[in-house]
Amino acid sequence: MVLTDRQSKILKLIVEHYIKLAKPVSSNLICKKLKCSSATVRSEMATLEEKKLLEKTHTSSGRIPSEEGYRYYVDNLMELKKMNAEDMLKLQIIFKNQQMVLSDCINKSLQVISDMTSYATVVLGSSSHENLLKKIEVVPLNEDSLIVIVVTDKGHVEHKNITLEGINIKDISKTVSLINNLIVGTPIDEVSSKLEYEVKPIIGKYVDQHEQIYNAFYNVFSEFSEPDINIVGKNKFLSQPEFSSIDKIKDLFNKLDDKEVVNDIKADDDNNINIYIGSENNIDEDVTVIKTKFKTPTEEGTLAIIGPKRMEYDRVVSMLEYLKENIER
């Protein structure tokens, strides 16, 4: 679809004005901005409506962008905003804090971005299918409890406290040796089924109290293979006029609480910043999801910002680029 220069200017003005104020845009406002007659502007707005880039609301004579209008704006008209100094400083302070590990930096940054934009932010850890088991270790804490440490080939380390009453430490060591001998190199999300079919049938031959020990290790791996998801600022949707209906917000919150729906955000393989507007995403036709992948020697995952379709696209894309750059640095 090709627009004239004037149509492009009108569409850009309407999108950016509506993003800011959430109010339909009248032809009078466009006339003032572009200094042309109201008849010309009304005619051009009617053409943009025919092209399905604008919509009329029932409550006003003004126009608002349609989903296709936002898409055209993002693909052809949007100019990226430079991050302002204040926003940049808030994020720089986090990444310069030597005391924080990377995952804490990412989570703190997403909290700050959520506060700055009033949108929800999400980080999804690297897929447990892409992490292979390198080894497990146990550290006894006292007679009944110990820490299980799971290390992956990508250097990712997880630990979990477990309680095993009246179990001989030798039996635990034998179980750890069995697991390390039989299932090292297995994707983390397949370890539970390998334990079930390869370790369980033979553990009884070597380990006395095998049932309690087996169940404890099985539970540890089941938890580690769950998708690693952190959503910040879900409640920000409550302040967005598009989500003023109780049913609408309940429906959206149910989707954001569904790990499978949220985990689906990271389906893309490419490394770019991708924008999914309305029906293009699997969460809700009234939201936009902007996301990108990050990769460091020890961690990889997906960052996403979720807001109404009336989102500050130019600002959010700049923030995500800045965040990705700092994480990978």
Image: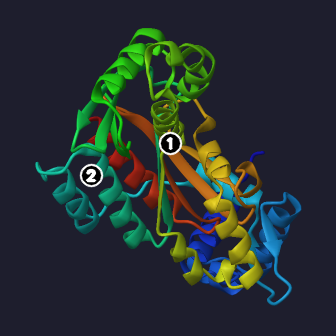
Task: Choose between 26 and 244: the one closer to the eye.
Answer: 244
Question: Are dots 1 and 2 in contact, CB under 8 Å?
Answer: no
Q: What residue type is labelled 1?
A: Glu
With 262 as the anchor, is 68 left or right in this view? Answer: right
Residue 105's label in the rendered image is 2
Can residue 134 be seen in the rendering of this structure? no
Screen quadrant of the C terminus: top left
Q: Which amino acid does label 2 sit on?
A: Cys
Residue 223's label in the rendered image is 1
Q: Which of marks 1 and 2 is nearer the N terminus?
A: 2
Screen quadrant of the N terminus: top right
Can residue 276 be seen in the rendering of this structure? yes
Q: Residue at x 42, y 14 (%)?
A: 178
Task: Choose between 134 and 63: the one closer to the eye.
Answer: 134
Quadrant of the rendered image containing residue 257: bottom right
Q: In this view, does 255 lie above or below 37?
A: above
Q: Whole-percent x and y of residue 155?
A: 30, 26
Q: Whole-percent x and y of residue 55?
A: 81, 71
Task: Choose between 43 and 124: the one closer to the eye.
Answer: 124
Q: In this view, does 29 lie above or below 179?
A: below
